[in-house]
Image: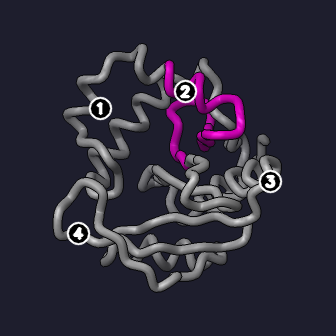
């Protein structure tokens, strides 16, 4: 799926050629929003480029994992992934959502989530689910504008003891 935002920005599923730019975006993501992701900046920076490339190749095809990026033709400025987990049949888990600060509020988030939703429907999953750190009200409001609803579930943060995440869902 490729969607066009403001010219020349597109949203597309990652390709193997995106590996270096995706690594740069991943490091930016971790520096800007360390609580939102499951690894530290130091861990990500220490990983060899070959590991990034392997992950991007995996996410570029198939129906278990997909990653989408906002691409203005230079540095990537946004990312959203989708994955399939056995504990949520019929749903795609949206993960690692990030927009470069200068591009927030310009429709990039909606375009990325729409790309994940289209992929989800294409693989037979009609619902999206995601988790947001409790207290990240800006993200919660942004997801609510995209149709996500708080399920009321609160789960432990996977890597920061004592922190909770709230679960949100919407139709794909």
Q: Secondary structure at mark 2?
A: helix
The residue that mark 4 highlights is 163
* Magenta segment boundaries in residue numbering: 54-80
C-alpha gap between disc 3 and disc 2: 22 Å
Image spot of residue 58 (x, y percent): 59, 26
Q: Secondary structure at mark 1?
A: helix
**Residue identified by numbered label 2:** 56
Q: Residue at x 71, y 51 (%)?
A: 115
Instruction: Report the residue marked by disc 1.
Output: 44
If the image is split into quadrants, where does the N terminus sit? top right
First in sequence: mark 4 vs mark 3:
3
Indicate the position of residue 86 as horizontal and vertical percent values. Answer: 58, 53
Residue at the spot 82% in from the left edge and 49% down from the top edge: 122
The residue lying toward the viewer, choosing from 40 and 141, is: 40
Specify which label sits upstream in the sequence, 3 or 1.
Answer: 1
**Quick one: label 1, few (<14), some, or many (20+) residues within 10 Å?**
some
Question: For residue 124, which numbered disc appears in the image?
Answer: 3
Q: CA distance from mark 4 to mark 1?
A: 21 Å
Question: Dot 4: few (<14), some (14–19), or many (≥20) neighbours within 10 Å?
Answer: some
Question: Which quadrant of the rendered structure holds the C terminus?
Answer: bottom right
- Work out how far the residue at label 3 is from the one at label 1, CA to CA, in angstroms: 32 Å
> Which of the two labelled residues, at mark 4 and mark 1, occupies the earlier sequence position?
1
Quick one: 102 or 91, which is closer to the camera? 91
The answer to whether the residue labelled 3 contacts the one labelled 2, judged by CB atoms less than 8 Å apart, is no
As drawn, 86 above or below 8: below
Q: Secondary structure at mark 3?
A: loop
């Amino acid at each position: 799926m490729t969607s066009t935002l403001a010219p020349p920005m597109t949203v597309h599923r990652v390709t193997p050629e995106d590996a270096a730019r995706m690594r740069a975006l991943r490091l930016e993501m971790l520096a800007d929003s360390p609580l939102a992701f499951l690894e530290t900046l130091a861990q990500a920076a220490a990983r060899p480029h070959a590991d990034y490339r392997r992950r991007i190749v995996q996410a570029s095809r198939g129906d278990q994992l997909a990653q989408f990026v906002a691409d203005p033709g230079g540095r990537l400025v946004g990312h959203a992934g989708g994955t399939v987990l056995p504990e949520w049949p019929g749903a795609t888990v949206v993960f690692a959502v990030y927009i470069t600060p200068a591009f927030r509020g310009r429709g990039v988030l909606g375009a990325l989530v729409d790309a994940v939703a289209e992929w989800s429907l294409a693989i037979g999953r009609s619902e999206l689910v995601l988790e947001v750190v409790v207290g990240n009200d800006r993200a919660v409001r942004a997801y609510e504008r995209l149709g996500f609803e708080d399920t009321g579930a609160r789960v432990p943060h996977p890597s920061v003891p004592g922190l909770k995440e709230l679960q949100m869902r919407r139709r794909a």
